């Protein structure tokens, strides 16, 4: 299975795995799973840490690349096609980070691991 972790799923995986559902945890842990993390997650964490909205994520921000390597997750850079698709999605759900994650999942054939039910309105396959 090819998975893309949303930002909170990444944070919970690395810091509080008990916050994950059994299905999400099992999918990430499964043999042969390819788990991707978007560079947009680093951006989202940085913005929220800087704004004081997510101070507990600062430790992840400081060692983002190392944490991904340790977990054997693959970094997914943002491509122009991802940005374009995120911008034209027909959905009332406007969160720019989630729109970009959904666009990446759609274009790259990934299932988005997210606890946010609203993300499903963006058309990407989701798992939680």
Image: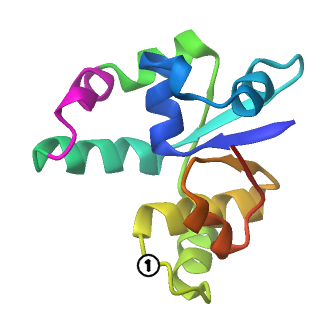
Q: Quadrant of the C terminus?
A: top right
* Residue 61 x, y percent position in the rendering: 29, 29
Left or right of 125, for residue 114: left
- The secondary structure that dominates the magenta segment is helix
Q: Which residue is mark 1?
A: 94
Nearer to me, 113 or 64: 113
Q: Residue at x 64, y 16 (%)?
A: 72
Q: Quadrant of residue 35?
A: top right
Q: Quadrant of residue 65?
A: top left
Q: Is residue 2 above or below residue 11?
A: below
Name the colour scheme. Answer: rainbow
* Residue 6 x, y percent position in the rendering: 54, 46
Nearer to me, 59 or 92: 92
* Residue 86 x, y percent position in the rendering: 56, 75
Nearer to me, 43 or 120: 120
Q: Bounds of the magenta span?
A: 53-62
Mark 1 nearby-residue class (10 Å; few <14, some 14–19, many ≥20)? some
Q: Residue at x 52, y 27 (%)?
A: 19
Q: Quadrant of the N terminus?
A: top right
Left or right of 14, for residue 36: right
Which SS class for mark 1? loop
Q: Residue at x 60, y 47 (%)?
A: 114
Q: Is residue 16 above or below residue 48?
A: above
């Amino acid at each position: 299975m090819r998975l893309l972790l949303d930002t909170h799923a990444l944070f919970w995986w690395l810091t509080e795995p008990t916050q994950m559902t059994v299905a999400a945890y099992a999918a990430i842990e499964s043999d042969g799973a390819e788990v991707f993390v978007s560079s947009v997650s680093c951006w989202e964490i940085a913005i929220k840490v800087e704004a004081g909205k997510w101070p507990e994520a600062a430790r992840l921000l400081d060692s983002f690349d190392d944490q991904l390597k340790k977990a054997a997750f693959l970094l997914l850079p943002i491509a122009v096609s991802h940005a374009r698709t995120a911008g034209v999605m027909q959905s009332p759900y406007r969160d720019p980070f989630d729109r970009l994650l959904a666009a990446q999942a759609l274009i790259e054939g990934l299932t988005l691991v997210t606890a946010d039910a609203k993300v499903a309105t963006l058309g990407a396959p989701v798992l939680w």
